[in-house]
Structures are given as C-alpha cells and as structure tokens.
C-alpha cells in the first residue's frame, strides 16, 4: 500500500508542478503560439502509443514473478525491439522534417519535428527502465525520478523562455549577454519548450546508465512473437486514448471554419481551448489519485461476498466528492484562471471549463465502473468502450466544431466520456452486478450542475463580494450534502 501511495502522490505532485508550465507558456506566447505547443503534445500521445506498441505491458506480463535470469532475457529482447523501431521511426521523422514542417505550416516547425523525433526515442527507451523499477518495487526511486524530471523541465523552460530571453533583450545581467547569445536564438521562441523537455529526458536517461551498460541486445523471434501477440492489441487502446484525450485540439484546428473567431484563426482558437482545458486538472488530479489508491483495493476486495455493496458505497461518495470539486472550481474560477493562465486573451474561453469539468467527472465515474471488466478478466470490453468513445469524439467534433467552435469540442468530449460511462454501467450490471445508488448519484450530479450553472452565471463586479457570495453558495451546497448524508456519516463516525 505504501508503494501505491508513493506512485499516486508522485504522479499528482508531478502533474501539479508540470501545470506551472501553463502559466509560463501562456505568459510568453499568444494563443496561436500556445496552440502550436498543444498540437505537438497532442500528437505525442499518439506517437507514444505507436512507438511503445504495448511493450511496457508485455514486460510487466512476462517479467513479473519471473526468475532474475528470465527477467533479464525479457528486458533484453523487448529493449532491443524498442531500440530498433524507435530509431527507425524517429529517423523517418527527422530526415523528413522539412516536408512535415511545410505540411504543418508553422515557423521553425521542421526543427521542432527534429527535436520531437529525438524526444520520442529517448522517451520510449525510458519505458522499460521505469517499468523495471516498479517490478523491483523501487517505488521511492521511481517517484523521485518522475518528480525530478518535471522539476528539471520546468526549470529549463524558465531558463530558456524567460531568463535567456530577458538577458538577450538587455533587461538585466548584461555581463552574461554574450554567453546567452551563444545558446539562445529569439526566433525559436516557444520552441524552446520542446528543447527543455528533450534535455530533461536525456538527463533522466543518464541516471539509468548502469542498466543500459549491462543491457545485451537480443532478438529471440520466438519470444518476441509472444510479447507482440500480447502487446499489439493495446495499440488500439492507445490510439483510442489519443482520440478521446487529445484529438479534439487537432480537429479543432483542422475543422474550424475560417473567420469563425474575429480575434484569430484556428490555431488561436485551439490555443485558447487548450489553455482553458488545463483548468479541468483539479478533477483530473482527484481521479488520478483515486485510481492509484482504489485499483489495489478493488482487486483485494473483489472476491469478498459483500464487495458489490462496498463498491456501490465507494461510488456514491466518489460522485459526491467530484461534484463538490466541480462547484468549488466553478465558484473560484475567476481567480484560479487569472492565477494559472494569466493573460486576458486566453480567458475568453472560460465558458468551456464547466463542460470539461463534467466530462472529467464522467471519466472518473467510468474508471470506477471499469472494476467489473478488470476483476472478471473481460478487459476486451475496455478496448471496445474506448473505441466507441473515439468514434463519438470524432463525429461530435466533425458536426459541432463548424457550429459551436471550441464549445463543440468540449461538448464532444462530454458526450464521449458520458457514453463510455453509461455503456460501462450497462455491461457491468450484466456481467458483475453492483447495486449502485443510481438515483442518489443522479440527484447529486443534477444538483451540482444546477448550482455550478448559477454560480458561473452570477455577475458581481467587486472581486471580494463575488468571492464571498460564490463561496457561500459552495458552502451551502456542501452543508446540504452533509445534512442529507448525516445518517451514513454518523455510522462511519461511530465505527
């Protein structure tokens, strides 16, 4: 359990630290510049799925509980395969960067593609060393390296995008200008975000020097066939995850009609949407922390006679917790957005945030519901549900973007995760019935949405008056929930 806490806390902490990049990037770039970053990192989700082709999971499957000698063979074979394919794929990207850059149509995009090609290779080669740490139960080192990587990335972003820029422009430390000018090219602008990420990955790669020195290249085709058979189907899930999680930003840029927003083009709109999307991180962090803690709990309890009732109870309070978070974020959205995004030109898209918050609530509930296909070994349903969600995402964006702009992308995301949630509940009740309190959950969801809608649309000019009124409504909502749940809470306290 202590390992689970370390993995969960390090993931949450890393994401929180990483979130400071939003303020850095939106501070130095206009929405169209931030849109370029968002496009590249959206594609990275897809390429990560293709570059790793399920081999991380295969490594877990065939190396866990294996002898040390066998574990080394699995590591050597899979690492050799990943090394060959990642170098091959990245070489294609690197040497065709000019053509890809022309297709993307951004300034310096050919150089960005080359940096990304190298980044994808390094990132892929780090997959197995990190997986090995988990198998060897070295959770503290795993967590330390993950958090360190994010801290280095943020530090390098500050160095290139703020410190070097300011010294180059003569704002301070003039004695260092000649040195800075050797490594800093102002024409690259926001592209330094990609270089910072690449350098951070390389530094973490160096910490695994011992593992790569002892690695012995092997290509045992008979063994590799086993690994591929197990891992390749996961590519579909990875691609579906990309479509559900990131394709809306790409599709928004491609399908937004010219002149839809008078403030800027489709890259501008995508930058605004991507920045506002980040404000749903509060729900995402809650769901992520919950997943790390809940999954071992579900597996441990699955065989118990009373487990369905227990799962239903957990779901009930999970929904309550998420809806209180939704109302809390909406009640404080004005100052949170100003703090975490900053620039006024990004804040025009804040109306998508409540929609995206609810989309992530549905995703969190889906993760909770997914216990049924995990404990019954029907994981293929996870793939089917993800692919179904991907179809809804694409169709939703196709039909809604030309009409509603980035609000269409947000609604498509909501529809995707909502449909996955409903479908998972329906199939789950068939194969692993759990007496979820559906009526109770719907009551809290609808009441939370209503309160959030009222709070979001309250227009009070004075900041502190607005802060007091909106948070008073939040407290009233929380107290109402505590009153309705008083009997259950009394039982918990008595126990």
Image (cartoon, rainbow, N blue to C red):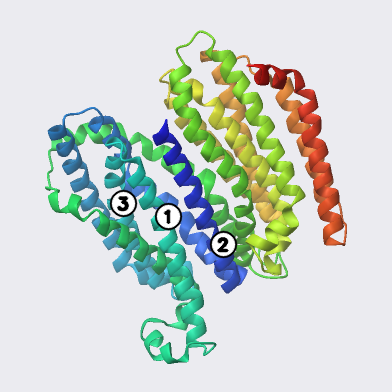
Residue ranking furthest to the top: 305
Mark 2 to mark 1 CA distance (whole Å): 17 Å
Q: Is mark 3 on a helix, strand or loop?
A: helix
- Locate residue 438: give its quadrant: top right
- For residue 457, above or below residue 100: above
User: Horizontal and vertical percent for residue 326?
Assistant: 70, 42
Say which mark, if any, is on residue 124.
3
- For residue 22, above or below residue 322: below
Query: Dot 2 corresponds to which residue?
Result: 22
Task: Give whichever of discs 2 and 1 has the lower sequence position.
Answer: 2
Mark 1 to mark 3 CA distance (whole Å): 11 Å
Task: Give whichever of discs 1 and 3 has the lower sequence position.
Answer: 1
Callout 3: 10 Å neighbours few (<14), some, many (20+)? Answer: many
Query: Dot 1 corresponds to which residue?
Result: 44
Q: Nearer the viewer, mark 2 or mark 1?
A: 2
User: Horizontal and vertical percent for residue 439?
Assistant: 73, 21
- Locate residue 140: give its quadrant: top left
Horizontal side of 72 relative to 120 (left or right) equals left
User: Horizontal and vertical percent for residue 276?
Assistant: 65, 56
- Locate residue 238: give its quadrant: top left
Query: Could you tell me which residue is drawn at 55 percent across and 67 percent down?
Result: 25
| Whether residue 75 is visible | yes
- For residue 281, above or below residue 202: above
Q: Is mark 2 on a helix, strand or loop?
A: helix
């Amino acid at each position: 359990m202590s390992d689970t806490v370390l993995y969960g806390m390090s993931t949450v902490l890393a994401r929180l630290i990483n979130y400071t990049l939003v303020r850095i990037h939106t501070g130095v770039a206009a929405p169209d510049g931030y849109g370029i970053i968002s496009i590249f990192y959206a594609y990275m989700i897809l390429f990560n799925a293709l570059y790793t082709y399920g081999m991380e999971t295969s490594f877990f499957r065939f190396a866990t509980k294996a002898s040390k000698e066998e574990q080394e063979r699995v590591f050597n074979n899979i690492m050799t395969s990943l090394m060959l394919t990642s170098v091959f794929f990245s070489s294609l990207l690197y040497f065709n960067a000019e053509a890809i850059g022309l297709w993307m149509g951004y300034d310096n995009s050919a150089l960005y593609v080359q940096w990304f090609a190298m980044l994808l290779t390094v990132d892929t080669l780090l997959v197995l060393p990190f997986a090995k740490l988990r198998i060897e139960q070295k959770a503290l080192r795993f967590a330390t390296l993950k958090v360190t990587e994010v801290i280095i990335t943020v530090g390098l972003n500050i160095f290139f995008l703020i410190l070097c820029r300011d010294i180059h422009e003569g704002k301070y430390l003039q004695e260092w200008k000649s040195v800075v000018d050797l490594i800093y090219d102002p024409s690259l602008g926001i592209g330094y975000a990609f270089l910072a990420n690449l350098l951070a990955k390389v530094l973490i790669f160096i910490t695994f020097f011992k593992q790569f020195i002892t690695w012995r290249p092997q290509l045992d085709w008979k063994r590799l066939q086993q690994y591929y058979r197990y891992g390749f189907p996961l590519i579909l899930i990875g691609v579906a995850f990309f479509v559900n999680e990131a394709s809306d930003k790409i599709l928004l840029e491609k399908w937004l009609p010219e002149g839809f927003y008078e403030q800027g083009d489709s890259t501008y709109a995508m930058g605004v949407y991507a920045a506002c999307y980040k404000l749903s991180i509060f729900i995402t962090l809650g769901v992520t922390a919950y997943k790390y803690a809940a999954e071992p709990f579900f597996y441990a309890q699955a065989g118990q006679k009373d487990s369905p009732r227990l799962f239903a109870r957990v779901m009930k309070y999970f929904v309550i917790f998420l809806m209180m978070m939704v109302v809390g974020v909406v009640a404080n959205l004005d100052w949170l957005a100003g703090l975490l995004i900053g620039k006024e030109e990004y804040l025009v898209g804040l109306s998508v945030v409540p929609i995206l918050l609810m989309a992530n609530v549905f995703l969190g509930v889906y993760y909770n519901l997914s216990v049924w296909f995990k404990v019954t070994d029907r994981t293929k349903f996870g793939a089917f549900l993800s692919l179904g969600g991907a179809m809804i995402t694409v169709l939703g964006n196709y039909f809604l973007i030309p009409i509603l702009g980035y609000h269409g992308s947000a609604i498509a995301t909501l529809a995707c995760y909502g449909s996955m949630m409903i479908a998972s509940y329906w199939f789950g009740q068939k194969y692993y019935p759990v007496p979820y309190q559906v009526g109770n959950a719907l009551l809290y969801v609808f009441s939370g949405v209503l309160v959030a809608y009222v709070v979001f649309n309250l227009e009070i000019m004075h900041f502190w008056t607005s802060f007091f009124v909106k948070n008073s409504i939040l407290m009233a909502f929380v107290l109402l929930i505590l009153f309705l749940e008083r009997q259950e809470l009394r039982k918990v306290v008595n126990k």
